[in-house]
C-alpha cells in the first residue's frame, strides 16, 4: 500500500543547524601506561549547567537546590534510591516537566550557556537537541522506518526522500539495529523484541541529530543480553553525544558511566568520577547505597 506521504517537509526553524553532529573527534585522552583510565572531566566542557534547581509538584518539593555540571561527550549516571528525584531532574533537562500540570521548576539550567527556561527557547527544538529514552520502549504504532523518519520529517531535517532514507539508515546503524531490521523496515516497530524496540527508540532519538541523550532506566525492562547490547551502544554513543542515564544497577553505572551523581531525598549528595564514587565515596549515604544498605 503506497501512500503519497505528505510531500513537503515542514520548513526548518530559522537558524537551525542540522548537520555537523558527528565527528569532530574527541580529544585524545588515553595515553599509554596511564594510571587513570577514566578521562579527566576537565578535558570535557560543561554541556549542561544546573544551579539552585528546585522542583515542586503542587506544594511537595521533589528537588532541592540542585547544582551539577554535566560534561560533554561523557556518560553521567544518576543513582540513588527510588523517589529521590532522578527522573524529575532528567525531565528538567528537556522541559518534559512542562507537560506535568502541577510541576514547577525554578533555578538555572543552561545548555551550552543558554538558559533553557528562557521565554525565547523553542521547546520543540530543545527536545530535538536533548532527546529522551524511557524505561519502557515506546515505539510509535508505525513501521520501523516511520518510527525513525518521523522526527527528521517534522523538523524538516531531510531535503527529500533519499535524504530521509539516508538519515533512517544512519540512525538505525548508529543504534546498532540496522543489520537486524534492514529487510523489514516496513514492519511495525512494535513487533520487534524488547531490546530491539529500545534500540529503535534510541535510533529515533538519534535521527534528529541531538546533542544530549537522556535515558531513564533504559534497560530495566530488558533481559541481560539485550541490556549488554544497549550498554555497548551507550559506550559507543558517548563519542558523539552527551549522555545522562538513570540506573538502579550499580554494575551498570560502573560499566557505562564516567561520572556518577548520587541523589538522596531530592538532594544531590555528591558527583564525581565514577570509579572514585564507587571505590571511595565521600558521603555516608552514597556508601550505604552502593553497598546495598538501602534502595
Ligand atoms: N508526576 C508527578 N506528580 C506528583 N509527584 C511526582 C510526580 N513525579 C514524581 N513525583 C514525586 O517526586 C519525587 C521524586 O520522584 P522521581 O523523580 O520519580 O524519583 P526517582 O526517579 O528518583 O525514582 C517522589 O516523591 C515522587 O512521588
Ligand atoms: Mg525514576
Image: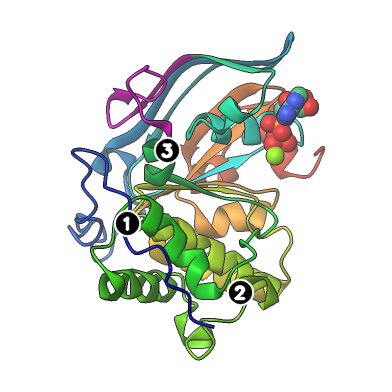
Question: Looking at this view, is 61 or 269 the one in front?
Answer: 61
Mark 1 to mark 2 CA distance (whole Å): 28 Å
Report which quarter residue 231 is drawn in: bottom right
Q: Disc 3 marks which residue?
A: 124
Q: Disc 1 marks which residue?
A: 9
N-term mark: 2 or 3: 3
Q: Is mark 2 within 8 Å of ligand 2?
A: no
- Judge depth for marks 1 and 2 and give the one in front: 1
Tags 2 and 3 touching, CB below 8 Å? no
Q: Is mark 1 within 8 Å of ligand 1?
A: no
Direction from residue 158 to residue 203 in the image, left or right:
right
Direction from residue 260 to residue 60 in the image, left or right:
right
Direction from residue 46 to residue 187 in the image, left or right:
right
Q: Disc 2 marks which residue?
A: 196
- Is residue 76 positioned above or below 264 on the image? below
User: Of all residues shown, which one is farthest toward the right?
Assistant: 294
N-term mark: 1 or 3: 1
Amino acid at each position: 500500500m503506497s501512500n503519497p506521504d505528505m510531500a513537503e517537509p515542514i520548513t526548518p526553524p530559522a537558524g537551525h543547524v542540522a548537520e555537523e553532529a558527528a565527528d569532530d573527534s574527541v580529544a585524545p585522552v588515553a595515553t599509554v601506561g596511564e594510571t587513570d583510565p577514566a578521562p579527566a572531566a576537565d578535558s570535557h566542557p560543561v554541556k549542561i549547567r544546573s544551579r539552585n534547581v528546585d522542583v515542586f509538584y503542587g506544594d511537595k518539593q521533589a528537588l532541592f537546590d540542585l547544582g551539577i555540571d554535566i560534561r560533554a561527550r561523557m556518560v553521567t549516571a544518576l543513582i540513588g534510591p527510588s523517589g529521590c528525584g532522578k527522573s524529575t531532574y532528567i525531565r528538567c533537562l528537556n522541559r518534559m516537566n512542562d507537560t506535568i500540570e502541577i510541576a514547577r521548576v525554578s533555578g538555572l539550567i543552561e545548555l551550552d550557556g543558554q538558559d533553557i527556561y528562557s521565554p525565547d527557547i523553542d521547546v520543540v527544538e530543545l527536545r530535538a537537541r536533548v532527546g529522551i529514552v524511557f524505561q519502557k520502549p515506546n515505539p510509535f504504532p508505525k513501521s520501523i522506518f516511520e518510527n525513525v523518519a518521523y522526527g527528521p520529517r517534522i523538523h524538516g531535517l531531510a531535503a527529500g526522500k533519499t535524504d530521509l532514507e539516508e538519515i533512517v539508515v544512519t540512525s538505525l546503524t548508529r543504534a546498532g539495529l540496522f543489520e537486524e531490521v534492514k529487510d523489514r523496515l516496513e514492519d511495525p516497530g512494535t513487533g520487534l523484541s524488547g531490546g530491539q524496540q529500545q534500540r529503535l527508540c534510541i535510533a529515533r532519538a538519534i535521527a534528529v541529530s541531538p546533542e544530549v541523550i537522556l535515558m531513564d532506566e533504559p534497560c530495566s525492562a530488558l533481559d541481560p543480553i539485550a541490556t549488554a547490547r544497549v550498554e555497548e551502544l551507550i559506550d559507543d554513543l558517548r563519542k558523539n553525544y552527551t549522555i545522562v542515564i538513570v540506573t538502579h544497577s550499580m554494575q551498570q553505572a560502573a560499566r557505562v558511566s564516567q561520572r556518577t551523581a548520587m541523589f538522596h531525598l531530592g538532594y544531590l549528595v555528591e558527583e564525581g568520577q565514577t570509579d572514585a564514587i564507587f571505590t571511595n565515596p565521600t558521603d555516608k549515604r552514597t556508601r550505604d547505597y552502593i553497598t546495598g544498605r538501602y534502595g
